[in-house]
Image: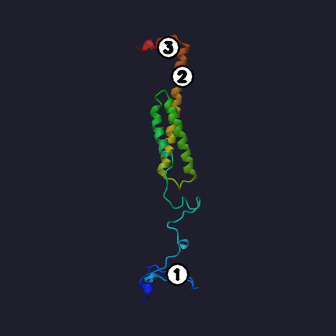
Amino acid sequence: MSEEQENPQENKPIDLSKKEDPIVEPVNDGPVTPPPFQQPPPFQQPPPFGQFGNGGFGQQNLPNGTAALVLGIIALPACCFYGIFGLIFGIIAWVLGAGDVKKYQLNPGFYTESSYKNAKAGKICGMIATILSILTILFFVLVIVGAITNPQMYDDFLRGLN
């Protein structure tokens, strides 16, 4: 073996007077590592969206599916508090759920079905809570207007409860 093959890692000055191109020889008869610009990427690049589903990656959850469900569930008992909190939470749950349902319908392969079901349930709970809250608010407004327009009948009603 030559001296170069015995000590391949030893730093040696390069003689620039020679016009020959240096030849890369494999160490220990192994393959030569190509320069970085010729190496394949370390991971698979996803194709552009719309061609092969979601690019080969796992499905994602809808961004507001869980929030819509939680707000929709909270909005249902919140209708009992004069309808105000139920109305606020119900409208927010309805809007968030409707937005996520549209996102899922545009690209169903990109999102999980469970997050779609959460968004749909949140939207439905928000709708129900909004309607119940409006009815509750309407009831209290009618009671207050009735008490203002006919106070004697209101007093008789309250005395009759005792």
Determine which quarter of the picture holds residue 98: top right
The numbered disc on residue 141 is 2
Please state, as top left, top right, bottom left or bottom right, where the N terminus lies in the image. bottom left
What element does badge 2 sit on?
Answer: helix
Provide residue 97's location: percent of width, then percent of height. Answer: 53, 43
The residue under label 1 is 14
Q: Is residue 78 above or below residue 156?
A: below
Residue at 46%, 34% in the rendered image:
76
Residue at 43%, 13% in the rendered image:
160
The residue under label 3 is 154
Provide residue 3's location: percent of width, then percent of height. Answer: 43, 86
Tell me which numbered mark, 3 or 1, is placed earlier along the sequence: 1
Real-space CA distance between mark 3 and mark 1, rounded to the nearest whole angstrom = 107 Å
Real-space CA distance between mark 3 and mark 2, rounded to the nearest whole angstrom = 14 Å
The numbered disc on residue 24 is none
What element does badge 3 sit on?
Answer: helix
Amino acid bearing label 3: Tyr
Q: Are marks 3 and 1 in contact (CB under 8 Å)?
A: no
Provide residue 21's location: percent of width, then percent of height. Answer: 57, 83
